[in-house]
Image: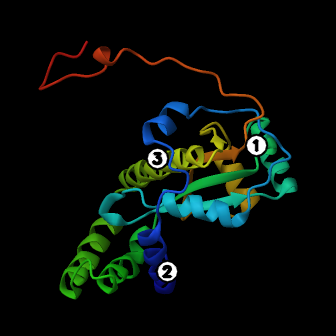
Amino acid sequence: MTQLIDSQVKVQTSITGHNNIPFFQVVGERRSVRKYDNSVRIADEELLEMLTIAAKAPSSANMQPWRFMVITDEELKAKLVPIAFNQSQVAEASAVIIVMADLEMYTLADDIYGASVKAGYMSEEVKTNMVANYTKMYSSLPADRLRELVAFDTGLVAMQLMLTARAKGYDTVPMGGYNRDGVKELLGISDRYLPTLMLPIGKAASPGHPSTRLPIENIVYFNGGKMD
């Protein structure tokens, strides 16, 4: 695991923009797309590149609890369709990424902070203290609080993944409507991992529907203003 984290440090510190699409354009163009061109394939290398960029998202204590199960096999995607309540995008998209949270992510604290020491980001003394403190804290949290924390972090990485995909010309749709136990059974995922999001990714066959948002003045409050 340490070798893997070391390689990720090298990759993540060398990433630069590829398409030079303005950030606000990427945000403005992102849509939830439900119809995909099923003839389009995304190479494993490109999927890994997008996930590497997405994994630069922040997380609590840099624990990086996200884990990704990438489904590109056509037969396996077809088996996901009934689990996803017969939503066709699961079969049509180039890939389906199951975003999961590792409920025992703190067991990798030594590897995570050890890589930071090697990269020159912290001292050995700081690393030792952080490993001890965070391992104790996370391992003693109530189960519901731990699930809340890791689910929050996977939301951050999922949003970053969706924006990365859009910047590279792909589309996505975040899905919470699926049978999590069914996914775990089909893919042999242990109870250590909590599936939080199913994310089809591919080339749109038809554009996602535009949508509106509440007026910003209706949802923003400054300095303790009264909330209706």
Density class for disc 3 (Cα within 10 Å; few <14, some 14-19, many ≥20) is: some
108 vs 35, left or right, is: left
In the rendered structure, which disc, 2 or 1, sits on the residue that comes first in sequence? 2
Q: Please tell me the numbered disc located at residue 155.
A: 3
**Residue bearing mark 1:** 90
In front: 212, or 176?
Answer: 212
* Relative image position of residue 74 (x, y in whole percent): 85, 54
C-alpha distance separating marks 3 and 2: 24 Å
The answer to whether residue 223 is visible is yes
C-alpha distance separating marks 3 and 1: 20 Å
Secondary element type, mark 1: helix
Residue under the point 29% across and 84% down: 117
Quarter of the rendering containing residue 86: top right
Q: Please tell me the numbered disc located at residue 7.
A: 2
Mark 1: which amino acid? Answer: Val
The residue sitting at the top extreme is: 228
* Relative image position of residue 212 (x, y in whole percent): 50, 17
168 vs 212, left or right, is: right
Q: Is residue 177 above or below residue 148?
A: above
The answer to whether residue 190 is visible is no
